[in-house]
């Protein structure tokens, strides 16, 4: 259990004065991850994306920890290099502190263009925590679909028209793909569960190996809801089991939040304009399919939890 | 530092190379003028849970000695998350949003 | 030098790997590609045998290879990689970034033709595609130069006036796989010559945090690029100084260009890489017949040594520039284009002809170079690029 009073005594590693949208979930994720990490030296690598551009508009940087960005598709690779340098310089005595490494990437930089470099870095088992702030579309360039965009969602490259009803494919389950890398720690979290995210970050940073946390990040602009509700929307995703919160530690599944009653998906869809068209009667079939996918995935997770802990 | 914005921009001979940018320099940048609403703290309803602080995307909730102590209006963008997350005391919010006087 | 020469038979790749062993970089991240594979393969054996302190990162692509080097260099490590052709092309994006972030990374590069059609042999289209990336470009005539230039490149790149990355290139197969006797320097001498990498700001210096790689919009991008351009300009002096120092210490001096029998030459060619060696044989032969021919070898293409070229060619009547790469209907081929525009400043301008040769590893023979000289001497040259060795 994280104690906020204790946490608040740590240095704030992400200052205000950055240019993320008001109410941005990425800012919440980055702050909470850095809160968790602020008790030790950390170096941060960032993929190109909302978080990167908004927090480092020259000559203003919001980062108080050493921070690095080079390109879009290579955050995990550049962090590999930083971590390799750490190992080398520690051997030669130029570095004597224990330093941890955190990489931030959006779903674009993680699921899609940066997928290869992420996979490579995890397979090589660099000791880094990779955090995906997953807002389910390419928000930085203007809400284009990504492989993390859910079925039926509007995006500017999967728009709604006379023939098409938003994104026609189901999203990629990257968390499962990361589990398949057999790394020691993989988790999902969401904005709205500060305790969960901070606990997971601390856990991941203590593990000697690659770790991955996929954090669902409501985006007020791309999802179209009232910005004050960023955390509320995140919790709704979890309560409907649209985005289960769980972790896989050395192959063992644990669902961290089990809703008392699984809310119907409509409750999650309703407040978001990206799903607005789905609530029209003619699109009920898509909603039913979304619900079916959720139910199947949830059942699968429960089963995994059971059989990996037997 | 605080003058970084109004300072005359340097030419290439004097400007530090782009291989270095001061950590945390964004603190000098104002985003408070983005607000249309401002959060107002009502201390008597505050239970010091710090939920406002942990959820603010803009590091704009001021905490002193582990106690909520108000807002940094230079950075607060008025998103209202703190007000929504605030449990308050006996159903009375300790943060309310008020229209920004222009 | 008083010591006895330590001559060893080495291919270009072996020579470069050997230089890397002696440099002992902190991080090497690489992905194999013909004909540069051996460089990193040999190097990984050094790592496996524990004869270097290097952290070797066997990345999953060349893009990640340079990305990891960039991260490592930013973190405070001396970082190197090796690649060729498509591999370099996959690095292009990151090459501009390495240079823009002012990170002194050295790439052991083997020139190979770019696809398509896919081909594994030597031409210079790969590095020419990175001409304006902000990388210094050194082209080597043989294995000895490759070995010597790798060692010098570390010093050049890390010089505080420069802080730019470099490619050190050999011609694919012609140098990379060709055994030559080269003189190796003692390990301690190389260690002493390259010194240690001491960056001013480095990410692992966690007590002095800073931000690297911020977004630079209209207000600052141009100034920062201007600084990078200036660094490239200043690199000329540094390359010369370090080439000279290398000569004083080890007996082989280096400069931006090398001239061969140019003093009284009527016709000259400009070449890069291994073709210089072939041309020297032709020159000797033709000189015996009383033909006044000479050569300018461009060792460094970036920064472009325009002053040196102008000075060296000012009295020559006609110059043929040989490109192992084409500019696809640019007025002339790329190297020719640059040589031509730098000579334009001369009051007495030499005539200039452009020759494109050796694409995809097509042989360049003594006869072909002789023919080029004969054509130059005859004065009957074409205005457009002429393609040497292609079947009509
Ligand atoms: S309104 Fe938004 S930005 Fe302002 S203090 Fe509250 S949470 Fe932070
Ligand atoms: S969330 Fe509300 S009750 Fe909790 S500390 Fe902030 S103002 Fe006080």
Image: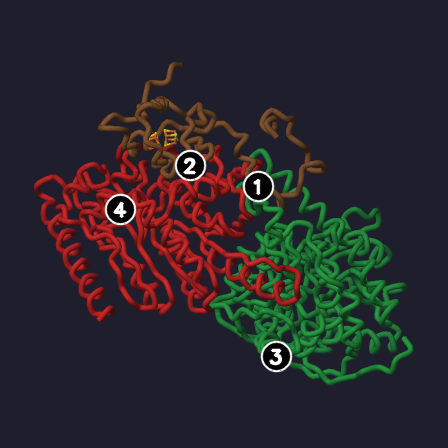
Chain colours: A red, B brown, C green
Marks 4 and 1 sit apart, C-alpha to C-alpha, by 39 Å
Q: Are marks 4 and 1 on the same chain?
A: no
- What residue appears at the point 64 percent right and 30 percent down from the top-left corner? B9
- Identify whether C150 is placed above or below A133: below
Q: Which mark is residue B23?
A: 1
Tell me the chain of label 4. Answer: A
Q: Which mark is residue C42?
A: 3
Marks 1 and 3 sit apart, C-alpha to C-alpha, by 41 Å
- The crowding category of the residue bearing disc 3, from other C-alpha atoms within 10 Å (few below 14, some 14 to 19, many at least 20), is some
Decide which of C206, B69 is in the foreground and name it: B69
Q: Mark 4 or mark 2, which is nearer the start of the sequence? A: 2
Nearer to us of marks 3 and 2 is 2
- What residue appears at the point 33 percent right and 18 percent down from the top-left corner? B99
Decide if residue C193 is on the left or right side of residue A109. Answer: right
Tell me the chain of label 3. Answer: C
Circle 3 sits in a helix, a strand or a loop, which is it? helix
Tell me the chain of label 2. Answer: A
Decide which of A195, A179 is in the foreground and name it: A195
- What residue appears at the point 77 percent right and 60 percent down from the top-left corner? C319
- The crowding category of the residue bearing disc 2, from other C-alpha atoms within 10 Å (few below 14, some 14 to 19, many at least 20), is many
Q: Seen from this angle, which residue lies furthest right?
A: C2
Marks 2 and 4 sit apart, C-alpha to C-alpha, by 24 Å
- What residue appears at the point 54 percent right and 50 percent down from the top-left corner? A68
Nearer to us of marks 1 and 3 is 1
Nearer to us of marks 4 and 1 is 1
Q: Which residue is mark 2?
A: A20
| Tag 1–tag 2 contact (CB < 8 Å) | no
């Amino acid at each position: 259990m994280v104690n906020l009073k204790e946490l608040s005594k740590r240095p704030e590693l992400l200052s205000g004065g950055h240019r993320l949208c008001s109410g941005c979930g990425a800012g919440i994720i980055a702050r909470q991850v850095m809160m968790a990490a602020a008790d030790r030296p950390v170096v941060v690598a960032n993929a190109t994306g909302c978080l990167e551009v908004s927090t480092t508009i020259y000559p203003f940087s919001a980062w108080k920890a050493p921070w690095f960005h080079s390109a879009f598709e290579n955050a995990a690779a550049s962090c590999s290099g930083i971590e390799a340098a750490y190992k080398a310089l520690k051997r030669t005595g130029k570095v004597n502190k224990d330093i941890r490494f955190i990489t931030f990437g959006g779903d674009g930089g993680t699921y899609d263009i940066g997928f290869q470099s992420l996979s490579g870095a995890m397979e090589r088992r660099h000791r880094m925590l990779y955090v995906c702030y997953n807002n389910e579309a390419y928000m930085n360039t203007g809400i284009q679909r990504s492989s993390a965009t859910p079925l039926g969602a509007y995006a500017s490259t999967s728009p709604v028209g006379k023939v098409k009803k938003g994104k026609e494919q189901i999203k990629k389950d990257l968390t499962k793909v990361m589990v398949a890398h057999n790394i020691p720690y993989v988790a999902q979290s969401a904005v709205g569960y500060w305790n969960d995210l901070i606990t997971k970050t601390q856990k991941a940073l203590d593990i000697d190996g690659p770790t991955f946390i996929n954090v669902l990040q409501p985006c007020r602009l791309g999802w179209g809801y009232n910005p004050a509700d960023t955390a509320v929307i995140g919790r709704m995703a979890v309560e409907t089991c649209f985005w289960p919160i769980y972790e896989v530690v050395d192959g063992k599944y644990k669902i961290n939040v089990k809703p008392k009653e699984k809310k119907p998906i409509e409750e999650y869809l309703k407040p978001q304009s990206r799903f607005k068209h789905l609530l029209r009667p003619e699109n009920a079939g898509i909603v039913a399919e979304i619900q079916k996918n959720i139910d199947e995935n949830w059942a699968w997770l429960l089963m995994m939890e059971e059989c990996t802990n037997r | 530092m605080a003058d970084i914005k109004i300072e005359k921009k340097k030419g290439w001979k004097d400007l530090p190379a782009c291989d270095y940018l001061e950590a945390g320099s964004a603190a000098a940048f104002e985003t408070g003028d983005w607000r249309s609403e401002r959060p107002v703290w009502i201390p008597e309803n505050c239970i010091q849970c710090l939920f406002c602080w942990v959820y603010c995307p803009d590091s704009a909730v001021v905490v002193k000695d582990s106690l909520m102590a108000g807002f940094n209006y230079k950075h607060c963008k008025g998103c209202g998350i703190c007000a929504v997350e605030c449990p308050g005391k006996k159903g009375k919010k300790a943060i309310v949003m008020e229209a920004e006087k222009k | 030098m008083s010591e006895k020469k330590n001559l060893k038979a080495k291919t270009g790749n072996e020579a470069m790997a050997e230089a890397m062993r002696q440099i002992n970089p902190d991080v090497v991240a690489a992905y194999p590609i013909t004909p540069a594979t051996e460089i990193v393969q040999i190097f990984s054996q050094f790592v496996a045998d524990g004869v270097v302190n290097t952290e070797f990162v066997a990345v999953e692509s060349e893009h990640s290879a340079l990305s990891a080097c960039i991260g490592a260099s930013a973190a405070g490590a001396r970082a190197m990689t090796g690649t060729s052709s498509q591999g370099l092309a996959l690095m292009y994006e990151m090459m501009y970034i390495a240079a823009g972030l002012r990170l002194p990374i050295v790439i052991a590069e083997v020139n190979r033709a770019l696809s398509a059609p896919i081909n594994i042999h030597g031409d210079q289209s790969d590095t020419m595609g990175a001409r304006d990336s902000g990388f210094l470009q050194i082209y080597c005539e043989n294995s000895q130069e490759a070995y010597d230039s790798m060692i010098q490149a570390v010093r050049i790149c890390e010089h505080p006036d420069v802080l730019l990355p470099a490619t050190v290139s050999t011609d694919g197969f012609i140098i990379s796989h060709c055994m030559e006797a080269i003189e190796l320097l003692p390990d301690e001498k190389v260690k002493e010559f390259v010194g240690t990498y001491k960056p001013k700001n480095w990410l692992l210096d966690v007590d002095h945090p800073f931000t690297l790689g911020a977004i630079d919009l209209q207000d600052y991008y141009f100034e920062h690029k201007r600084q990078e351009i200036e660094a490239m300009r200043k690199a000329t002096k540094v390359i010369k100084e370090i080439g000279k120092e290398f000569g004083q210490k080890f007996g082989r001096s280096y400069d931006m260009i090398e001239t061969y029998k140019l003093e009284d030459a009527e016709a000259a060619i400009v070449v890069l890489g291994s073709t210089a060696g072939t041309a020297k044989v032709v020159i000797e032969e033709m000189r015996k017949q009383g033909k006044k021919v000479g050569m300018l070898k461009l060792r460094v293409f970036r920064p472009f040594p325009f002053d040196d070229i102008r000075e060296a060619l000012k009295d020559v009547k006609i110059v043929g520039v040989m490109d192992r790469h084409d500019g696809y209907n640019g007025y002339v081929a790329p190297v020719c284009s640059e040589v031509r525009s730098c000579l334009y400043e001369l009051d007495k301008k030499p005539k200039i002809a452009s020759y494109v040769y050796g694409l995809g590893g097509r042989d360049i023979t003594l006869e072909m170079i002789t023919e080029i000289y004969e054509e130059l001497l005859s004065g009957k040259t074409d205005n457009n690029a002429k393609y040497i060795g292609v079947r009509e």
